[in-house]
Every structure is written in structure tokens, then in C-alpha cells.
Amino acid sequence: MELQTRLLEKLLNAVKGAFSGTSLPFMRKGQERLGALGVRSLGDSVFFTSEKFENFEAAFACPIDAKSDIAVLYLHGGAYVSGGISYAKSFGGALAALLFAPVLCVNYRKAPEHPYPAALEDAFAAYLRLREAYPNKRIAVIGESAGGGLSLALGLKIKEQKGIMPDLFAVISPWSDLSFSGVSYMTNTKTDPTLNEESLKHFASLYIANDDPKNPFISPIYGDFSGFPPVLIIAGTEELLHSDSLLTASALIKSGVKHELYLEKGMWHVYPLYPTPEAERAKEKIKEFVFNEG
């Protein structure tokens, strides 16, 4: 791990301790402020246009030089309870600049106000809109954390509806097992400076409500991935959700799906969203995968 990354890790650990157990409104407000800072950091390299949907907000992030043959659906993280349009636009805008591609950033509905299946319904509606807007481009679905799990659940939904599958998926630290069956929830509880198992289990209960945590549309590791396009999984070895990525890879292997599991030693949950050398390498891996697969 680079020195710059170690210093950031110490800071994150301090913040994790200070804000443990904070209220959901406080969490949401903080995530939106971070998102607004991320959008401002993009400068003039990306512009945004609102996209109207009946039940949720969305926006297209478009780079000044949109020269690639890809269009992207981006689904943000936030444990299905947090993350608004500014947060969605932040990393969505970064992806637009990275991939020279239009990115539809989706502020899907959140629990507890809107438990499952609201987020999946919104992701599906957004996917259909993206296909309609860019019928001649390859389609990539990219998501991180809850948005990574939602991306895979979306693929299962498209398959169920006999729709046209995306050309590829790229998921960062996907929260793909809301049944918490993985061993890393025990082994990595002290090594991840960003996540708390108790809070995650609470948020999972808000999203799942009265449904089954092993429902494949909630926990995609229990689904049948046959027929999926190539999938890139990026995760850190020290993150609380490390097992989710390993179990996702195992499910893809079982279904015969071409995939790549990219693990960064010593890194935490959704590390590609942070300003570190390791994050830059991960973003280059996404770029390489998007342009070479599908």
C-alpha cells in the first residue's frame, strides 16, 4: 500500500469511529455533500442534463469529447438507503470522463421509504431508457457497493423479462449477498475503515422488508447468471464485503460466464472512488475492460 493511501486509511478509520451510529438523515446529507464536491472537481470536462422519470431522478453525464461507442448505466452505492442525485453524478461524471461516453446516473428510490423492489424497478426503467436513447451503442452497466449488487440483479431482471442484455457489467465491491453468509463479515470487521456490519444489517433489513434475503433479485449470488455478458469484479482484500465478490465470482463460474476478478491487496470497500494510486489503477482496469469486452 502506498504511503498516501496509508494516511488516507488512518483518516477514514478516525472518521468511522467518530460517525458510527449516526442517523440516516445525517448520513444522507453527508453523502450528498461529498457528491457535490465530486461534481465540482470535474470542472468543465463533463456536462449534465436532467432525464425525467416518473418515480425518480436521473441525469446524463456527457464528456466534452464523447467519442466512444459505449453508453453506460451507472448505479451508485449507499446501502439502498442513501445517495442522491449529486452523489450519483459524482462518480457517474468521473466514468463519463474516463470512458469518453454518456453515462446515465440514476438516483433510484431508497429504503425505508421505498423498500425492494423499488430500486430494481427504477434500474430497469433507466436501462430501457438508455437503450432507447442509444440504440447503436454498446451498453455497459457499472455500479458500486449496493449499486454493484443492483447491477447484477438488473441483469437477472432483464433475463427474466427476455430483454436485450447489456454488453458487459463492471461492479465495484458489489453488495451481492444480503444474507451475510460470507466469512469476511467476521475476518475483515476490523480491517475495513469504511463499513460497520451492524449498520449494514440494519440497512439490509430496511431494504428487504418482508422479503427473503436469498431472493436472487436482492442477493444476486443466489441467481442463475447463465446468458450474462462478461463481468468485471473489482474489490479490496481487506473490505468487509470481500466475500461478496468471491461468491459472485463463484456464481459466475458455476453459470459459465466469462469474468475477471480484480483484487487489490490491502484495500477497503469501494476503494476506486478514493484519491489513491490504487484507485487510478482500478479505473484504468475498468477502462481496459469496457473497451476490450462486449
Image: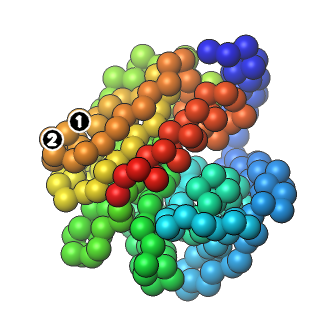
Quadrant placement of the N terminus: top right
| Disc 2 residue type (three-letter) | Lys
Indicate the position of residue 120 as horizontal and vertical percent values.
Answer: 41, 66
Which structural element holds mark 2?
helix
Residue at the image position 31 percent from the left and 51 percent from the top: 230
Indicate the position of residue 278 as horizontal and vertical percent values.
Answer: 61, 28
Camera-nearest residue between 276 and 64: 64
Camera-nearest residue between 186 and 156: 156
Residue at the image position 22 percent from the left and 47 percent from the top: 257
Vertical placement of residue 71 versus 98, above or below: below
Asked if residue 206 lies left or right of residue 34, the reply is: left
What residue is shown with label 2? 254
Indicate the position of residue 126 as horizontal and vertical percent values.
Answer: 48, 75
Asked if residue 77 lies left or right of residue 276, the reply is: left
Looking at the rendering, which quadrant does residue 233 occupy?
top left
Callouts 2 and 1 close, C-beta under 8 Å: yes
Asked if residue 10 lies left or right of residue 246, the reply is: right
Looking at the rendering, which quadrant does residue 209 occupy?
bottom left
Dot 2 crowding, Cα within 10 Å, few <14, some 14–19, many 20+: few
Residue at the image position 47 percent from the left and 33 percent from the top: 235
What residue is shown with label 1? 250
Looking at the rendering, which quadrant does residue 5 occupy?
top right
Quadrant placement of the C terminus: bottom left
